[in-house]
Image: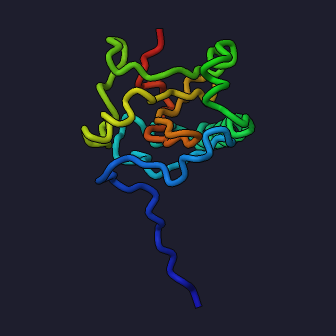
Amino acid sequence: MTKSKKKPKISKVPTSNVTNTDISNKDKHLIISYIYLDLENKKYSMNLLGSNREIINFYSDFNEKLKEYSEFENFRKKITTDKTYSKRNHIHPIDWADNQIRESSFTSLNSHQMEQISEDCWQLGINNDGFRIHGFFIENVFYIVWLDPKHNLYPRK
C-alpha cells in the first residue's frame, strides 16, 4: 500500500510583528530560521541555477558555510568585530538606501515588519561564486528571507 506524500509547506507569508521566541540566548550559537523565506520572488530563487551540478554544488556550499557560521558562540559579535573574516565571507549589513542595491526592502515583509528589522538586515556569503543569502537578525537567530544564487541584490562591480 502506497502512502500519498504531501508536499510540506516551507514558506509562510508573515502577517504580524516579527518576533523571536527566545530572546534570552544572545550569546549562544547562531540559529538559522526559514520562517520568513520568500519562495515567491523569482529574482531570489534556486530556479535561477541551471544545471543539476550547480544545484548540488550550491547545497554543499550552503550546508558547509552555515555549519561554519553556526560554530561561533556569538556570530553577530564575530561579524561586527572581525572585519577580515566578514570581508572574506562577503558579510555586511544591507544598506537599503544604497544606490547600487536593486531593492528598497524585503518585498515579502510588510512595512511594519520592515520598520522593525530594517537596521539589522544582512548579507551572508555562501561561496566566492556570488551565492549570497539575505535576511535579518533578532538576537542570535538569522532569519533567511532571500536565497540569492546569482548575486542579484547587489550587482557585481
Which residue sits furthest top?
A: 157
Q: Tag count in the figure?
A: 0
Q: Position of residue 33 (x, y in %)?
A: 53, 48
Visible residue check, residue 2: yes
Which residue sits furthest bottom?
A: 1
* Colouring scheme, one of rainbow, by chain, secondary structure, one colour: rainbow
Q: Position of residue 120 (x, y in %)?
A: 45, 29
Q: Position of residue 23 (x, y in %)?
A: 54, 47
Q: Give the vertical position of 73 relative to 152 (above or below).
A: below
Q: Quadrant of residue 107?
A: top left
Q: Residue at x 59, y 91 (%)?
A: 1
Q: Give the vertical position of 13 relative to 129 (above or below).
A: below
Query: Would residue 103 appear left or right of 68 to someone viewing this image?
Result: left
Visible residue check, residue 53: no
Q: Position of residue 155 (x, y in %)?
A: 42, 16
- Front residue (pair 151, 113): 113
Q: Residue at x 40, y 19 (%)?
A: 95
Q: Residue at x 35, y 13 (%)?
A: 98
Q: Residue at x 38, y 46 (%)?
A: 18
